[in-house]
Image: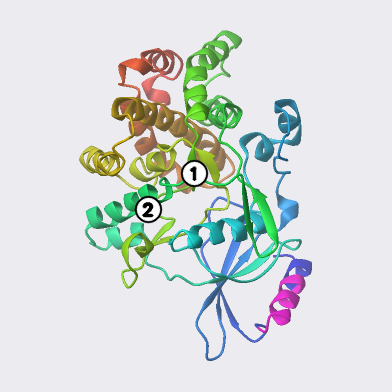
Amino acid sequence: MSPERDAQTARFLEDHGLAAARREPLAGDASTRRYERLHPAGGAALILMDQPPVLESPVCPPGATQCERLALGYNAAARLAAGSIAAFVTTAAYLRDHGLSAPRVVAFDVDSGLAVLEDLGDALFATLIAKGEAETPLYEAAVDVQVQLHEQRPPDVLEAEGLAWPLLTYDALALKVSTDTFLEWWPKFAGLPPFGADAVAEWDALWAPVWVRGEAGASVFCHRDYHAQNLLWLPERAGAARVGLLDFQDALRAHPSWDLTHLLQDARRDVSPELEASMLERYLRARPAVAREEFLADYRALAASNAARILGRVFARQALLGRSQYKAFMPRTWRYLERNLRDPQLAGLKAWFDTHVPAEARA
């Protein structure tokens, strides 16, 4: 942290009566956010979220054209919130208003990119399972959160604390620019030549129906990064509120399968095909009006798109930036991608990968 940012943070904490709190840095992730646990004298622990706005490209203005979004950069094109405090505050309020466990926001400053949050603890699903906790009950609760969220159509704008944040649609352009990061980053990582114009044109033609289906089905609130390292177990609460929710500021209106693809094809931990199938059945039993075969086809297609995005923008890009820990996740993500591509409806995409990304170039 720069001296200037440190001084700004200290002023923010002082303004909210937390100047004397002991500050404990927490482990970071691939984002530009930083977290600390605050220990006020005689009070419960809190979380400081530090998201300097200057570190991110602009977000997508409502009503922006595709050309305008592309000109503004990746965040606008992919409809990411750039860590916006306004997005976090309004999304947290929406989730809490629907009986779910998002952190209460104790204090915030949108312009400086700082917020103090309720501390929901450290009982991450991934941590608990690694220590021997049975995974099925945790995943059942996580699926129940999805069912509860999908029972109502989300609003166009999220509002709370005098703030408003548009809940945009995960549309075909956002899906395309996200998936296309595979084309940019995987050859650089794997030592392949850049994909030629014909290969790129074929890629676009094969993926286009998937992205169109994703936009056409965009009807529910989507957390967007819904997996075992962003979910906390809160057993003292009841029902779906037992699942603590983190890192939801990039929320959109999206296809109902989208968060399930993150949860059940988790790039950071193995989810067995048996558990995946069982949880999809749980979701579909709870929502009998959903057209089963159409939903599962969309699930596999969008999961394939997501795996390509993760391999490109998240893992290959981060590895090339020197964060070698992401290499460990690549084989698992390739297995997910290859499993999805066994769907006969995705045969063209399977052939594309088999032609242009040989087995030895798949980490």
Q: Count neighbours of disc 2 (C-alpha within 10 A) and say few if under 14, some if 14 to 19, many if 20 or more.
A: many
The part of the image, by quadrant, that contains residue 184 is top right
Residue 337 appears left or right of 255: left
Residue 285 at x, y percent in the picture: 25, 41
Q: Which residue is mark 2?
A: 145
Asked whether the residues under the numbered discs 2 and 1 touch, taking CB atoms below 8 Å apart as contact, a structural biologist would say no
Q: Secondary structure at mark 2?
A: helix
Image quarter hosting the C terminus: top left
Residue 103 appears left or right of 156: left
Q: Secondary structure at mark 1?
A: loop
Instruction: Say what amino acid the circle numbered 1 marks.
Output: Arg
Report how many numbered discs are placed on residues in the image: 2
Q: Earlier in the sequence, mark 2 or mark 1?
A: 2
Name the colouring of the figure: rainbow
Q: From this viewpoint, is residue 161 visible?
A: yes
Image quarter hosting the N terminus: bottom right
Q: Which residue is mark 1?
A: 153
Q: Is residue 154 magenta?
A: no
Nearest the viewer among 94 and 78 is 94
